Amino acid sequence: SSPDSDGCTPELEKAGLLNKTKIAEGGRKLRKNWSPCWVVLVGNSLVFFKDPKSQTPSSWKPGNSRPESSVDLRGAQLHWANNLSSKKNVFKLRTVTGNEFLLQSETDSLIKEWYNTIQNVIDRLDRE
Ligand code: I3P
């Protein structure tokens, strides 16, 4: 049987290292501060973990490590945003509460996978 056969544990969809900066909080613009971040997509949320060295996708377990923050993907908007940075492969995630994040990877295939996976979750929530 699957690890989620009781249906109570949200499904881990994806986890990995991305560069992240928050650029707005509740619609108010913030100064960029890029840093590497373990990003975990689980259930309806994108969860951010601070210390990349102490986190790996395989070591992540619900309740086992303390997230820096998490983002509710319901109603969120995702856009490619190479115009918002000098870096390549940047997309912007905007939450319903007006928090905005840029996420970036040097690896083209990796950032496309993240974009598509997050968009699929947003689309699924839009249909609910
Ligand atoms: C910012 C820093 C960011 C850069 C940002 C700069 O300077 O260099 O990395 O964003 O550009 O303002 P500081 O460290 O002095 O805050 P990108 O790397 O995404 O280009 P921006 O102001 O054009 O957004």
Image (cartoon, grey):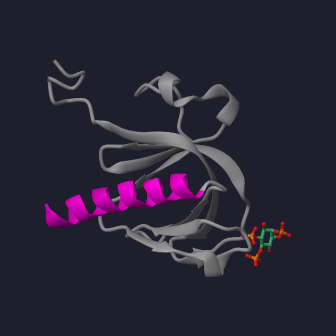
Answer with left or right where residue 113 lies relative to residue 44.
right
Rendering quarter of residue 85? bottom right
Q: In terms of image quarters, where does ligand 1 lie?
A: bottom right
Residue 103 included in the magenta stretch of the image: no
Question: Where residue 107 appears, x then y in whole percent?
Answer: 62, 54
**Location of residue 49 by image quarter:** top right
Q: Residue furthest top?
A: 1
Is 34 drawn above or below residue 53 in the view shown?
Answer: below
Relative horizontal placement of residue 124, taking residue 13 as reference (left or right): left
Q: Residue at x 25, y 64 (%)?
A: 123
- Numbered disc total: 0
Along the line of sight, the residue nearer the viewer: 38 or 95: 38
Q: Residue at x 67, y 71 (%)?
A: 30
Q: Check the picture and name the quadrant holding the N terminus.
A: top left
Vertical position of residue 68 compared to residue 90: above or below = above
In percent of width and height, residue 75 lies at: 30, 68
Magenta residues? 108-128
Name the residue at 68% across, 47% down: 36
Q: Main secondary structure of the magenta part?
A: helix
Quarter of the image with the C terminus in it:
bottom left
Question: Does residue 59 appear to the left or right of 53 in the view shown?
Answer: left
Q: Position of residue 28 (x, y in %)?
A: 58, 77
- Judging depth in this view, the residue of 18 and 45 nearest the camera is 18
Give residue 115's position: percent from left, percent from top. 44, 61
Q: Is residue 69 left or right of residue 53?
A: left
Q: Residue furthest front?
A: 109
